[in-house]
Amino acid sequence: MHIKSEIRVLGIDDSALIDPSVVIIGAFMRGGEQLDGVLCSHITKDGMDATDSIIRLVRGSKHYGQIRVIMLDGVTYAGFNPVDITRLCAETGIAVIVFMRSCPDFEKIKQALVHLPEKEERWEIIQHAGRIYRIDGVNPVFIQLCGIEKESAIQLVRMTSKHGNIPEPLRLAHIIATGVVLGESTGKA
């Protein structure tokens, strides 16, 4: 994939886990420079509806035809509501990059899933997200991908990380999501 400086990226993050219905926000940006739109939906805390909700959010957006990459902040939202990135990529036709600040501890994840219904299906979706790649820097970060080559994904993460090591579409989605739900953005993206 050729990465242009104004590539359209949709970063998606969730809000605080206050209610059983959790707000997810999409920040639609040109590269990491300009916010062109905000998308909003809801998913269930510890549910199994994140993939379907994100597909509907993306495909229902007026920006759908312009989005070239979807960035997710991890592969689970609203607690342990997993996103099937292969299905998300296939049903939207858009490449997916999962961004993580640290490498997941799969043993801890497996232990946490024991307490939830459909634990095998959740674990399968998490495992199905594929290989984890490390991006070295002052603070290394990690990515998983679907529909995009590793080199292009690394280039895009670096290009959109303007204020530290978090891509702007994810940073803004986090700020907006926490602000909407809590009345003011808090914590780090």
Image: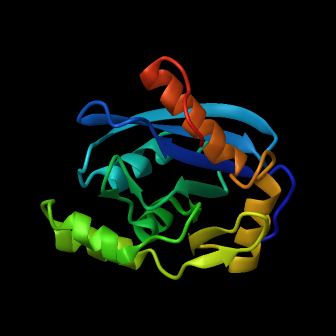
Tell me what residue is drawn at x 34 percent, y 46 percent.
Answer: 78
Tell me what residue is drawn at x 65 percent, y 50 percent.
Answer: 67
Q: Position of residue 103 (x, y in %)?
A: 53, 71
Look at the image and tell me whether residue 65 can be seen. Answer: no
Q: Is residue 123 above or below residue 160?
A: below
Tell me what residue is drawn at x 54 percent, y 30 percent.
Answer: 186
Q: Is residue 104 above or below residue 101?
A: below
The answer to whether residue 93 is left or right of residue 127 is: right
The answer to whether residue 186 is left or right of residue 55 is: right
Quadrant including the C terminus: top right
Q: Residue pushed farthest top?
A: 183
Q: Position of residue 54 (x, y in %)?
A: 42, 49
Q: Is residue 29 above or below residue 182?
A: below
Q: Position of residue 127 (x, y in %)?
A: 37, 78
Q: Position of residue 28 (x, y in %)?
A: 65, 40
The residue closer to the viewer here, 146 or 90, is 146
Tell me, what colour scheme is on the image? rainbow
Q: Residue pushed farthest right?
A: 5
Quadrant including the N terminus: bottom right
